[in-house]
Amino acid sequence: MILRLSGKLAKKLSTVPDEAIPAHGNPFLDWSGHVFRVGRVQYILLTNTRSLYSVLFPGRGITRPDLYEEHAREQIRLQLERDGFGWMHDRFLAPDPEAVSYSRALNRHVTGSMNDMIFHAGFLIEEKEMSLDEVTHFLNHMPMSYLEDVYPDRSLEALAREMVWDRLAVCGAPLMVRAEEDNLDSTDVSGGLSLSPDPELLLVSLEDACRELGRPTAESGTQRPREATQALLLALKLHFPSFFEEHLAGRELYEDVLSDPVHGRIIRMKRVAAASLADYL
């Protein structure tokens, strides 16, 4: 996990990072922090570096890196749960075995966006007397120019969808970048994730993918992900029947995708998926 510190926050914690670490392969593990005052009260703004999704909490008493890490992890979890995103914490943050790496800010765009949020937060706390929960809600529903006027909470949702498909690709779903429709030897889209496929990750990723496909608001551009998911399920059903029967058979979540028509492209994609699954099942 990367925790990026502003100059003021680094001074408060008595730790000065040596460099700006490149973006984490898992964007849910990359957060930027800044400290500011409203009157005599100190606050910390903790912002997801990629999506700008943020949480605001009091800074009093947080004077060491270990205390900051403890508060940061807990505040992220609580905010995600408040916004109905608890599953994102369970999938993308909770399994994190890494020690925290402290870093300088990634770039001026993120720093500028955080300064803009701090300006609004200060006004809302001091002039409107809003609670921290209310201010955090406002910040996560504020269009940001860095995100091309997308709200941070919507940006985080898009990030989660991207992670779902990246993890499924790691597990063997034939989600590929390719120049021609039938070129099935092209490069996989794995999102740069440092994950190794295993049965547990496969089951979790399949469940997340099928739930995403079943959302009423699923985007129109889901044909390729749906075909890749169908091909992966077919490969499991036909080539790994014992695994399929034990974990997937009879569940409506998966049967809905399997009920789609099977055409030639799906059959070719199924062969690619079966070859990938054979490496770890």
Image: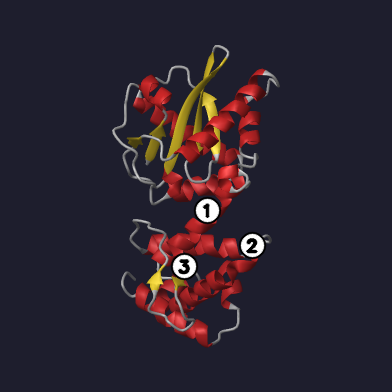
Answer with mark 3 or mark 2, whichever residue precedes in sequence.
2
At label 2, counting other C-alpha atoms closer than 10 Å, the crowd grade (few under 14, some 14-19, many 20 or more) is few
Q: Is residue 238 visible?
A: no
Residue shown at the point (54%, 57%) measured from the top left: 161
Residue 14: % across, % down: 33, 21
Q: Quadrant of the N terminus?
A: top left
Q: Is residue 194 visible?
A: yes
Residue shown at the point (60%, 43%) measured from the top left: 145
- The type of residue carrying mark 1 is Ala
Residue 247 badge: 3
Residue shown at the point (44%, 71%) measured from the top left: 176
**Are circles 3 and 1 on residues that touch, CB within 8 Å?**
no
Q: Gap in Å between the C-alphas at discs 3 and 1?
A: 24 Å
Q: Gap in Å between the C-alphas at discs 1 and 2?
A: 13 Å
Give the farthest residue toward the top.
40
Would you identify the image quadrant in which residue 251 lies? bottom right
Residue shown at the point (31%, 31%) measured from the top left: 17
Answer with mark 3 or mark 1, whichever residue precedes in sequence.
1
Give the farthest residue toward the left.
18
Residue 218 badge: 2
Q: Quadrant of the C terminus?
A: bottom left
Residue 267: % across, % down: 48, 85
Residue 4: % across, % down: 40, 35
Callout 1 secondary element: helix
**Are circles 1 and 2 on residues that touch, CB within 8 Å?**
no
- In the figure, 60 relative to 51: above or below? above
Is residue 195 found left or right of 267 in the rendered image?
left
Residue 160 badge: 1
- In the figure, 203 relative to 52: above or below? below
- The type of residue carrying mark 3 is His
Answer with mark 1 or mark 2, whichever residue precedes in sequence.
1
